[in-house]
Image (cartoon, helix red, strand yellow):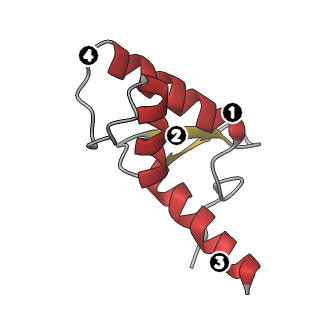
Amino acid sequence: MTETIIGPPRLTRFERARIIGARALQISLGAPVLIEPPKNVTKPIDIAMLELEMGILPITIRRKLPDGTYVYISVQTLLKLEKEAKKRKRI
């Protein structure tokens, strides 16, 4: 069985910032919001952060590997790996 190399098994701070910024821009330009935000959340950046935390953004990240090839990873996969790592740390 071959294991796919994905780099860090989490969203990096740079990926997280890029995703939130891009999604906030989409929302501010009139894109439909994927969640029903609480009434006190009105800023596009806050809505984008909530969407990312909930793991409902249909976004794929492209990471460059050391050999020059690229690997494509969905945000949902990385968020799931982050949660699993946090659970293992608590145990």
Using the image, tell me which numbered label, if any, was put on residue 84.
none
Picture quadrant where residue 68 is located? top right
Distance of label 4 from label 1 (alpha carbons): 25 Å
Task: Name the amino acid type tagged 3.
Answer: Lys
Mark 3, mark 2: which one is toward the viewer?
3
Instruction: Provide residue 63's location: percent of width, then percent of height.
Output: 62, 40
Residue denoted by label 4: 30
Residue 74 visible at all: no
Picture quadrant where residue 78 is located? bottom right
Say if mark 4 contacts mark 1, CB within 8 Å: no
Question: Does residue 3 appear to the left or right of 25 in the view shown?
Answer: right
**Which residue lies at the image location 77% right of the left edge and 42% below the top edge?**
66
Instruction: Provide residue 89's location: percent of width, then percent of height.
Output: 75, 77
Residue lying farthest to the front in this orientation:
40
Residue denoted by label 1: 14
Q: Earlier in the sequence, mark 3 or mark 4?
A: 4
Task: Name the amino acid type tagged 1.
Answer: Phe
Q: Is residue 4 above or below residue 45?
A: below
Q: Is residue 60 above or below residue 19?
A: below
Residue denoted by label 3: 87
Residue 19 visible at all: yes
Mark 4, mark 1: which one is toward the viewer?
4
Label 4 CA crowd tier, 10 Å (few <14, some 14–19, many 20+): few
Q: What element carries label 2?
A: strand
Task: Name the amino acid type tagged 2.
Answer: Ile
Distance of label 2 from label 1 (alpha carbons): 11 Å
Distance of label 3 from label 2 (alpha carbons): 24 Å
Picture quadrant where residue 41 is located? top left
Question: Does residue 64 appear to the left or right of 28 in the view shown?
Answer: right
**Quadrant where the image shows the N terminus:** bottom right
Q: Which of marks 3 and 1 is nearer the N terminus?
A: 1
